[in-house]
Image (cartoon, helix red, strand yellow):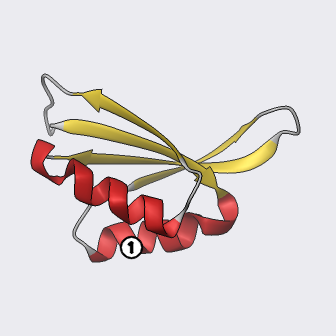
Amino acid sequence: MKLLIFVTDDSVADSTVDSLVEQGFRVTRLASTGGFLRKGNTTLLVGVEDAAVDRAMALVRDAAPGTLSITVDLERYERM
């Protein structure tokens, strides 16, 4: 299992979330601000099985070019 973290521009966040949800991914959306000009960003958290990482990355690459992507291995996770 992997946690994909995408930091994208606010202007493409809606279409990016829509693309991921349409393909069956669950997405948590967080408003974030950063950088020198305090530009508005959206951070997306997507938990995916290892086999689906490339598919999720391709969807985001198409919907939001230039998005920062971070992949984190999840050794353990629980639904509580």
**Going by the image, does 57 lie left or right of 75?**
right
Residue 64 horizontal/vertical position (percent):
54, 62
Q: Determine crowd level at label 1: few under 14, some 14-19, many 20+ residues with C-alpha closer than 10 A.
A: some
Residue 42 image offset from top left, x and y in percent? 60, 51
Q: Residue furthest right?
A: 37
Residue 35 found in image quarter: top right
Assign the N terminus to one quadrant of the image: top left
Q: Is residue 11 left or right of residue 46?
A: right
- The residue nearer to you, when weighing 2 against 78, is 2
Q: Which residue is mark 1?
A: 19
- In this view of the protein, can residue 26 be seen by the observer? no
- Furthest toward the top, the residue is 75
Q: Quadrant of the C terminus?
A: top left
x 23%, y 48%: residue:
53
Which is more toward the observer, 4 or 26? 4
Residue depicted at 33% across the width and 49% down the height = 46
Place of residue 51 in the rendered image (x, y in percent of width and height, measured from the top left): 11, 49
Residue 25 visible to the viewer: yes
Q: Residue at x 34, y 53 (%)?
A: 57
Where residue 40 sits in the image (x, y, percent)?
Answer: 75, 50
Residue type indicated by callout 1 = Ser
Q: Residue at x 20, y 27 (%)?
A: 74
Number of numbered discs present?
1
Kindly state the secondary structure of the residue where label 1 is placed: helix
